[in-house]
Image: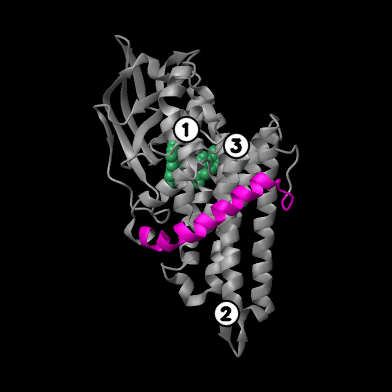
Amino acid sequence: MTDYLSTGTLPDDYRDLALTVRDFARQVVAPVAAKHDEEHSFPYEVVAGMAEMGLFGLPFPEEYGGMGGDYFALCLALEELGKIDQSVAITLEAGVSLGAMPIFRFGNDRQKQQWLPQLTSGRALAAFGLTEPGAGSDAGGTRTTAVLDGGDWIINGSKQFITNSGTDITRLVTVTAVTGQADGKKEISTILVPTDTPGFTAEPAYNKVGWNASDTHPLSFTDVRVPQENLLGERGRGYANFLRILDEGRIAIAALAVGAAQGCVEESVRYAKERAAFGQAIGRNQAIAFKIARMEARAHAARTAYYDAAALMLAGKPFKKQASIAKLIASEAAMDNARDATQIFGGYGFMNEYAVARHYRDSKILEIGEGTTEVQLMLIGRELGL
Ligand SMILES: Cc1cc2nc3c(=O)[nH]c(=O)nc-3n(C[C@H](O)[C@H](O)[C@H](O)COP(=O)(O)OP(=O)(O)OC[C@H]3O[C@@H](n4cnc5c(N)ncnc54)[C@H](O)[C@@H]3O)c2cc1C
């Protein structure tokens, strides 16, 4: 990893990775994207392909079955997948940065040995259970409880909107729960809950506006009993640790969003050259060409923002503000580009089987998940001392 990354000067190993994932996205993901979107089905065959390529192990060391790469490599893969199918990209993003990463960052040796090899190989998925019916942006509002009883945690409560939490290969959910009170405040800790534990239920999947091939469920916990050793990281540090995971995750979501924004540009350029109206290709009208030029500028600016945040993170420097900026502008770029691309496609852009229509439905959640636009603005303001 170079100290400073800029677009167009990627070292060979990163560029080769991006090109390999680009080919996979075009040849394997694209042909089945509309079908899985329409059927709301989880793309097991695509996930198996990503696993075979080692994508679930990209930022992890080889001793845990990883590829020995870094977080920026993951971002490049997400950008390429995000161009073609956001559902597939978010499945990888959540599997790696929300599923396996908390264990890698905060787990002890035993927990890493037990869980990481299956997660980094993509044989299994772990989910990240933070959000609750009454605790989203205000994640400290957690009501789920975990009480120690004879060497076990007894967990009761519920989580909602949890990605990758109910697939056939989901094996683990990492949850935040209130484990007591400290200095008059809730003590929140993180606990590993294998999905075959009695009392744990992944309720029926949501019927979403987009990301239809991504797996999302409400979860319920009724007297779920797991050993005390399933505490992940220090007791009482659960909330702080999850916030660190979300800071990183914002760079990954930004990369996915840049992919979506760029995918809309590519579709629009192609269509604007092909589609004729009033005796010429629609792209010959400046109104269309300017729209696409602005879309390209948005995608480019958002890409430089996530490259910058990733470079700071990998250099071990503070990156909170830059991660929020990247997430903010990349998600807006994706939504704006999806709206413009749909307009350029005219009536076809409103037909579900078209990639731009899928981006139109899929992109909205980019402004909501892993911290809404308002939360990013709040975080940036705080970093400015406001
Ligand atoms: C498809 C999908 C997948 C998801 N995956 C996961 C997952 O894997 N794990 C997980 O834990 N969560 C997940 N989430 C949850 C997601 O992170 C939350 O939905 C998001 O953080 C917003 O929380 P909320 O829905 O409770 O909205 P709220 O927090 O209720 O916010 C409602 C609105 O109020 C605004 N708002 C709130 N507070 C303020 C304020 N102080 N100032 C200004 N505006 C404010 C928000 O920006 C928003 O516009 C997922 C959500 C979806 C839809």
The quadrant in which the C terminus is found is top right
Q: Earlier in the sequence, mark 2 or mark 3?
A: 3
Rendered position, 303 above or below 224: below
The label shown at residue 78 is: none
Q: Earlier in the sequence, mark 2 or mark 1?
A: 1
Residue 340 percent coordinates (x, y): 57, 67
The amino acid type found where label 2 is placed reads: Glu
Q: Name, please, the residue furthest toward the top.
A: 150
Cα distance in 3D space between marks 2 and 1? 44 Å
Q: Name which residue lies at 40% across and 28% down.
A: 175
Is 10 positioned to the left or the right of 152 in the image? right
Quick one: label 1, few (<14), some, or many (20+) residues within 10 Å? many
Q: Which residues are magenta?
A: 7-36
User: In the image, which is nearer the foreground, mark 3 or mark 1?
Assistant: 3
Q: CA distance from mark 3 to mark 1?
A: 14 Å
Q: Position of residue 116 (x, y in %)?
A: 45, 29
Position of residue 4 in the picture relative to residue 97 (left or right): right
Of 385 and 88, nearer the camera is 88
**Residue 336 visible in the displayed image:** no
Residues 268 and 143: in front is 268
Residue 69 circle label: 3
Q: Could you say where residue 155 lies in the image, as x and y percent from the top left?
A: 32, 23
Q: Is residue 201 left or right of residue 363?
A: left
Residue corresponding to mark 1: 100
> Which residue is disc 2 drawn over?
274
The residue tagged with tag 3: helix, strand or loop?
Answer: loop
Magenta span: predominant SS is helix
- State the SS at label 2: helix
Above or below: residue 180 compared with residue 79: above
